[in-house]
Amino acid sequence: MHEHLVTAAPREGLAARRPAERDAFFDNAKYLAIVLVAVGHAWEPLRDGSRGVSALYLLVYAFHMPAFIVVSGYFSRNFDASPGKLRRLVTGLLVPYVVFETAYTFFTRWTDQEPGRPVSLLDPLYLTWFLVALFVWRLTTPLWKRVRRPVPVALAVAMLATLTPSIGDDLDLQRVLQFLPYFVLGLSLGPEHFRLVRRRAVRLLAGPVFAVALVAAYWAVPRMSGAWFYHRDSARELGAPGWSGPVMTLVAFGCSLVLVGCFLALVPGRRTWFTALGEGTLYGYLLHGFLVQGARFWGWYGPPWLHTPLGVAALTLAAAAVVTTLCTPPVRRALRCVVEPELRWAFRRETPRPAGP
């Protein structure tokens, strides 16, 4: 929810390049997507009694994580399990997962009033699931690059996962499997595909498509569960018949891809004031959750005015401002040791291979 991806920027991709070579479009997309993540989390307590907020929430959740994951897959195309990339996989995903999984467990012991909540690295808490998922997906990248029809195969895996409630909560494997098609799709994309959605004709269509999608979400709020877009439960766990799982997987995949395309079409391709913040979205992703969790405990959602349209607008701006601050260079410098540690002492020095005859 994070590398030059949207919430957890892939260090094997553009982030491994010199700053001058970074693509402003993807940094802009990462920043705007992390803002949507923070805003969506901020809206969550306001959904009760507000069909409008629920519709906005449903719309955002239909595409913001798929957008992250597609871009994550795109920047994972060069992952080849070489020693250097395996090391960056550990330091950029696995270590932050351990640190923040532990931190969120201790923090929510207090905010949720559950002092006995155990630290379990096998059961991702809150938004840390994405780090686990990306770790698993990236490890499987060489396999997907060898499969002849990777996206249909990944979709079949996701559809079967919805029929299997016995998968359980270990490593949030339901999410890992159900979101897998978006990552594999990203692996299959090339620069030309992103140029395609950025054409002027697509940009002109994006706004009306979002408007229609919002109307559809407003209609759907009392008629369907938005949990289908969370991809964390099987059909049976959602109280739906088994056959609906594979069907909803395909429906959600189609809807999400249309909205992801529209989102990317509206992302500016030039450098803007927030382009540099795209390098720090992993920090915004991992840190904003503490404020979201604490806000409920501290009673920040109590004032009635906050549940009015003006209050929702103010909360939206506040969430955007907070996550923007968390992506800034001072925050990154202060917390780089836990979010992007080097850990050179933990790895053997790579020895160059002898040149062939």
Image (spheres, rainbow, N blue to C red):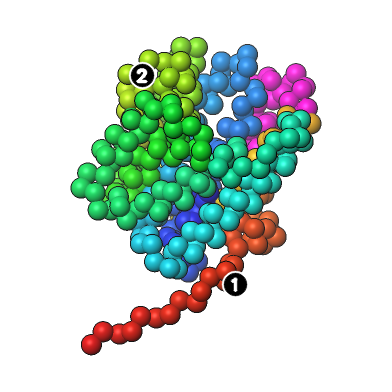
User: Residue 193 versus residue 154: which sits nearer the camera?
Assistant: 154
Of mark 1 and mark 2, the one earlier in the sequence is 2
Q: Is residue 217 left or right of residue 343?
A: left
Q: CA distance from mark 1 to mark 2?
A: 50 Å
Q: Is residue 278 left or right of residue 310?
A: left
Q: Are marks 1 and 2 in contact (CB under 8 Å)?
A: no
Q: How many marks?
A: 2
Dot 1 alpha-carbon crowd within 10 angstroms: few under 14, some 14 to 19, many 20 or more: few
User: Residue 200 versus residue 313: which sits nearer the camera?
Assistant: 313
Residue located 41% across and 15% down the image: 240
The answer to whether one can see residue 321 in this image is no
Q: Is residue 263 above or below residue 223?
A: below
What predominant SS class does the magenta segment belong to?
Answer: helix
Q: Please identify the residue farthest to the bottom as the structure is shown.
A: 357
User: Residue 102 versus residue 206: which sits nearer the camera?
Assistant: 102
* Residue 3 % position (x, y): 49, 56
Dot 2 alpha-carbon crowd within 10 angstroms: few under 14, some 14 to 19, many 20 or more: some
Q: Amino acid at mark 2?
A: Gly
Residue located 64% across and 61% down the image: 336
Q: Is residue 12 magenta?
A: no
Q: Amino acid at mark 1?
A: Trp
Q: Which residue is mark 2?
A: 242
Residue 125, image quadrant = top right
Quarter of the figure that contains the C terminus: bottom left
Q: Which mark is residue 345?
A: 1
The answer to whether one can see residue 130 in this image is yes
* Residue 114 % position (x, y): 74, 31
* Residue 113 % position (x, y): 76, 30
Residue located 38% across and 45% down the image: 183
Residue 249, image quadrant = top left
Give the extent of the magenta segment: 299-321
